[in-house]
Amino acid sequence: MTKISKNNNQSGFTPSLEGRVGEGLFPEERVGERLPFSRRNFIRTTGLTAVAGLTGIETLFAAMKKKTTKNSGKGLVLRFVPYDLQLRHTFTIANSSRKSTPDVLTSLEFEGVTGYGEASMPPYLGESVVTATKFLSMLNLSQFNDPFQMEDILRHVDSVMPGNCAAKAAVDIALHDLVGKIMGQPWYKIWGFDPADTPNTSFTIGIDTPEVVRQKVAEATPYRILKVKLGQKTDREMIETIRSVTDVPLCVDVNQGWTDKQMALDMIHWLKEKGVVFVEQPMSKTAIDDMAWLTAHSPLPTVADEAVQRLPDVMKANGVYSGINIKLMKCTGMREAHQMLTLAKSMGMKVMIGCMTETSCAVSAAAQLSPKTDWADLDGNLLISNDPYKGVQVVNGKVTLIDQPGVGINMIQAVFKEK
Ligand code: MG
């Protein structure tokens, strides 16, 4: 049985956490449901948050861990299933084109509570259903009897093999969803972020014929910023086509497509006149000196995407780019993404939270970080036609978080076979 009691010997509430993790903090509350306001609910929302704020999340976890060592001994149960994401439009960027994206959906169960995750694997990143399922098969998560040991669990996952970042993210997201559900809180709250601070999200317009581009822009009416894929000879035509039908702010993603720094600078000056607000990965990720020069002279912020994958890359990008694009599939998930956000902000860099073509699961997970980012590009779930989850919403172009535990999703189409 789990309970939270008031310590009458002290001036404030001191939560005393007892019992098994699997029962949840509030046995009378089913995961995902909201309680009416009550004294117990008040203690939950103020006492726990206060402790987290004063002593830090890690200390809170450690305190809970001490009380959660008794359980069935079954450990964490990982399941995974391949799931091909069908794209609404054939998607073309500077160097590839495709109609679907391979994906592996995961679930992580502990004592009756289940968290969900996924690995989305655009082919150019080097992972596949074969590599992801092989990696996930190698994991022995049943050795972990406490999901709150996130540091140890995720360090173990990261140490099994190098690379496999999307597969690692599939475990990380499922673990965050699980722990958030056990705590009864969404991660933006656990991290202390204000959901009112979420940015507008951009909607991506892929490289295509003027007719199709105009059609895509027409579909993107609710969005307050559009992300335009550049990096081909038709760059100016793309921008002119979009400007012929809308005057919303634009950002551009060149996907390393420009090779000459002076030409890149000339383009950026022209793009600024066309209402572009920043330029993502204009040149090769290896062109470090040219990029540092371009950023120093550019009238618009430059954002590293391909050049920044994991935490150590953030330090290298400082002084070379104005900001970074964090994606869960690149950086192994929410835990490292949060660390990258904190590090980049501490160095005065801009931060964008992005995604691949993904279900609402990974997009909702990434959205938990969005209140502290400058820009969001969280449209991956909107680009697919077979999303099995419902989660974060875009309302009037703005990322809109929901007050639901974990990463904030509901499964609307069964994808895991019954046990
Ligand atoms: Mg990009």
Image (cartoon, rainbow, N blue to C red):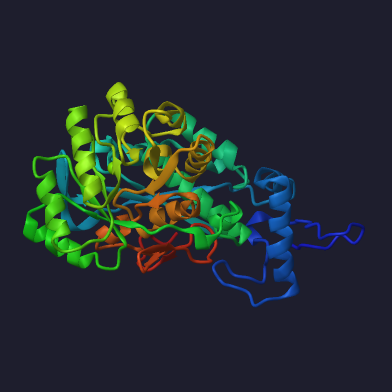
- Residue 36, compared with residue 210, is above or below; it is below
So how many labels did they put on this image? 0
What is the quadrant of residue 302 in the picture? top left
Q: Nearer the viewer, residue 414 or 388?
A: 388
Between 289 and 327, the residue placed more toward the observer is: 289
Q: Residue at x 34, y 30 (%)?
A: 296
Q: Is residue 371 left or right of residue 270?
A: right
Compared across the picture, whether 222 is left or right of 402 comes to left
Q: Position of residue 362 (x, y in %)?
A: 40, 53
Please give the name of the residue rendered at 40% of the width and 38% of the height, measured from the top-left corner: 323
Q: Measured from the top left, where is residue 160 in percent x and y?
A: 46, 30
Quadrant in the rendering for residue 258: top left
Residue 111 seen in the current view? no
Q: Residue 343: image x %, image y %? A: 52, 36
Pick the quarter of the image with the C terminus. bottom left
Could you tell me residue 1's position as x and y percent? 73, 62
**In-front residue for pair 212/125:** 212
Q: Residue furthest top?
A: 289
Residue appearing at x 67%, y 51% in the figure: 71
Q: Is residue 127 visible?
A: yes
Looking at the rendering, the quadrant in which ligand 1 lies is top left
In the figure, 331 relative to 199: above or below?
above
Residue visible at 10% across and 59% down?
212
Q: Residue furthest right?
A: 9
Describe residue 241's horizontal placement relative to residue 189 as left or right.
Answer: left
Q: Is residue 304 above or below residue 120?
A: above
Query: Residue lying farthest bottom?
Result: 36
Describe residue 47's horizontal placement relative to residue 408 as left or right. Answer: right
